Amino acid sequence: MGRASPSISKDLCPSEGYVIVEGRGRQVERVANLDVEVMTDSTTFIELACGRIDSQIVINSGAIQWTGDAEPAERVARDLRFTM
């Protein structure tokens, strides 16, 4: 049996809601009891997802941040372009 996927929220922009990932992503209004929350603005999200900017530079600058379990959160931040 595979490892359970953590609940991960990407806060793209408060007016746009949240995306929760439990196997597959879906947009929701709000999420309670998250394992991980990854926060960035929509421009940075698109640039990361399209591979236009280096994820390490974004992490170092603080343009993407997370709370909760650091290992899956950092993996999301680093590998976003491969998951979109």
Image (cartoon, rainbow, N blue to C red):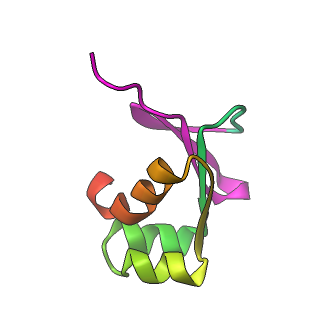
- 47 vs 84: above or below: below
Using the rendered view, name the quadrant where residue 79 is placed.
bottom left
Q: Is residue 5 left or right of residue 27?
A: left
Closer to the camera in the image, 7 or 25: 7
Secondary structure that dominates the magenta span: strand
Which residue is painted at 61% across and 77% down in the image? 62
Closer to the camera in the image, 70 or 13: 70
> At which x and y percent is residue 72?
45, 48
Magenta region includes residue 57: no
Which residue is painted at 37% across and 60% down in the image? 80
- 7 vs 36: above or below: above
- 67 vs 40: above or below: above
> At which x and y percent is residue 11?
63, 55
Q: Which residues are magenta?
A: 1-28
- Most extreme residue toward the top is 1
Q: Is residue 7 left or right of residue 46?
A: right
Which residue is painted at 42% across and 55% down in the image? 76
- 71 vs 43: above or below: above
> At which x and y percent is residue 71?
46, 51
Which residue is painted at 48% across and 67% down in the image? 45
Q: Identify the image quadrant of the N terminus.
A: top left
Magenta region includes residue 12: yes
Q: Identify the image quadrant of the C terminus.
A: bottom left
> At which x and y percent is residue 42?
56, 68
